[in-house]
């Protein structure tokens, strides 16, 4: 019998499977995507994750690949890293989890352990335990083991954080937490035992905290536009030498975790609407940028707007739930001619030179390090129209202005006139 199977080889599951194999465990990796399985069989990472390709090269002999969830029963530990989207009715979508459970049910036997790694709504771990009890009669915590072991690692930091961030374990029944700890302690992180629902809440509210924290400067940015104030100067005034400051900078706040996880609390909230308001603030940033453009340059019909960045955040190739796409759609609805550049994402885009050539406006949608250099700014200034507007909610070059003409940005960034 193998040591562990990981079902779902996405950005959470695949690095985890590699880490288990790198710790000396025999691993089965399961995914229904033939392209992803094909890439792995050729020894290639299907997405960007710093350090992952080197680990894959090391552990190929200890990672067996499979395309059917039922194959996971050949391992004692089964880790589920499946998609758990939120439905449009503010409701968790458990279809992927239920489908995998149905595939596994005939094959489970005493001694198996199921660990939920995906972000889930409160009481989902107990639902899974009850599902196994209802359909197979297992005594959870004695016959088989069920736990929630949430993943809280930042995108592109897996191998940096997997051995250092505290590993929360919420087990059902007498021994589930101990069994889960036996597996995850192999990765080196300190284990923190708790109840399943507290593990679920800790994960959800980790993301809600970040989503809310980023909404505040985004709302402040909108207020500053209304009052003709500079958001970056106001944030500096809030934070400078003040022990109770801490206001973050504005930007396009999105990604699969942050955009959906608030719904897992909102689904049964006793204060409905609070987190929906947070979401509306963050979701309104693309509209704010488009409206700001129109106020300064007039109609966008037939004007070329270069959008820099498709990834949902800096320094990653992950495009899932990126607000860049919403921004692009809104620009297209204004009949603008949109050019796109992102050097990291798998979606084909134009070169930076082609994207900014003769542009009437350039919007920094993702603050990739490649964009935030004097060289990139110089390329934008040289390629775009002389009076082009540069929209930079991230303050990429330290010019401390969301909307400014390119030559103004050069001066404000302290790079001298061009």
Image (cartoon, rainbow, N blue to C red):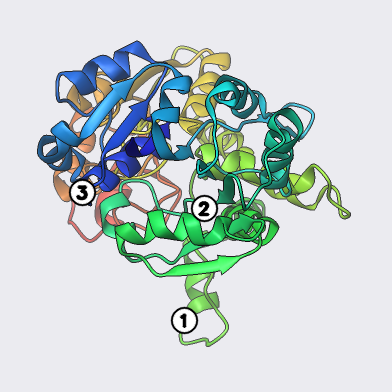
Residue receiving disc 3: 24
Does the CB distance between marks 1 and 2 fall below 8 Å?
no
Circle 1 crowding by C-alpha within 10 Å: few under 14, some 14–19, many from 20: few
Residue receiving disc 1: 240
Distance CA(mark 3)–CA(mark 2): 20 Å
Q: Residue at x 63, y 50 (%)?
A: 222
Q: How many marks?
A: 3
Disc nearest the viewer among 3 and 2: 3
Judged left or right of residue 172, residue 66 is left
Q: Residue at x 19, y 36 (%)?
A: 62
Q: Earlier in the sequence, mark 3 or mark 2?
A: 3
Element class at badge 1: loop
The tag on residue 173 is none
Residue receiving disc 2: 149
Q: Position of residue 264 (x, y in %)?
A: 71, 44
Q: Residue at x 10, y 40 (%)?
A: 58
Q: Is residue 348 visible?
A: no
Q: Position of residue 268 (x, y in %)?
A: 83, 46
């Amino acid at each position: 019998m193998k040591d562990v199977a990981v079902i779902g080889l996405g950005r959470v599951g695949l690095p985890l499977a590699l880490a288990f194999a790198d710790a000396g465990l025999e691993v089965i990796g399961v995914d229904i995507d033939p392209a992803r399985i094909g890439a792995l069989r050729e020894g290639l990472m299907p997405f960007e994750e710093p350090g992952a390709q080197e680990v894959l090269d090391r552990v190929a002999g200890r990672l067996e690949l499979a395309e059917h969830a039922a194959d996971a029963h050949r391992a004692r530990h089964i880790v589920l890293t499946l998609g758990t989207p939120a439905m449009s009715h503010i409701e968790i979508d458990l279809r992927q989890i239920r489908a995998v459970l149905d595939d596994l049910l005939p094959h489970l036997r005493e001694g198996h352990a199921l660990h939920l790694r995906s972000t889930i709504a409160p009481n989902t771990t107990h639902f899974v335990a009850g599902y196994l009890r209802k359909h197979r009669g297992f005594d959870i915590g004695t016959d088989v083991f069920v736990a929630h072991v949430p993943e809280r690692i930042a995108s592109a930091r897996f191998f940096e954080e997997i051995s250092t961030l505290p590993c929360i374990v919420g087990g059902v029944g007498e021994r589930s937490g101990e069994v889960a700890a036996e597996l995850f302690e192999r990765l080196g992180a300190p284990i923190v035992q708790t109840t399943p629902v507290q593990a679920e809440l800790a994960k959800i509210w980790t993301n809600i905290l970040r989503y809310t924290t980023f909404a505040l400067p985004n709302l402040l940015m909108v207020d500053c536009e209304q009052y003709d104030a500079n958001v970056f100067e106001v944030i500096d005034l809030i934070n400078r030498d003040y022990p109770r400051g801490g206001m973050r900078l504005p930007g396009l706040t999105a990604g699969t975790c942050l955009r959906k996880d608030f719904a897992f609390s909102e689904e049964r909230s006793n204060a409905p609407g609070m987190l929906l308001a947070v979401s509306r603030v963050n979701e309104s940033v693309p509209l704010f940028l488009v409206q700001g453009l129109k106020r300064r340059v007039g109609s966008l019909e037939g004007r070329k707007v270069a959008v820099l960045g498709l990834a949902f955040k800096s320094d990653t190739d992950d495009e899932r739930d990126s607000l860049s796409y919403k921004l692009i759609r809104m620009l297209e609805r204004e009949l603008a001619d949109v050019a796109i550049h992102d050097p990291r994402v798998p979606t084909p885009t134009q070169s930076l030179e082609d994207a900014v050539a003769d542009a009437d406006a350039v919007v920094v949608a993702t603050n990739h390090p490649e964009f935030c250099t004097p060289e990139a700014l110089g390329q934008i200034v040289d390629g775009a129209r002389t009076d082009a507007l540069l929209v930079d909610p991230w303050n990429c070059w330290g010019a401390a202005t969301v909307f400014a003409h390119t030559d103004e940005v050069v001066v404000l960034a302290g790079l001298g006139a061009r």
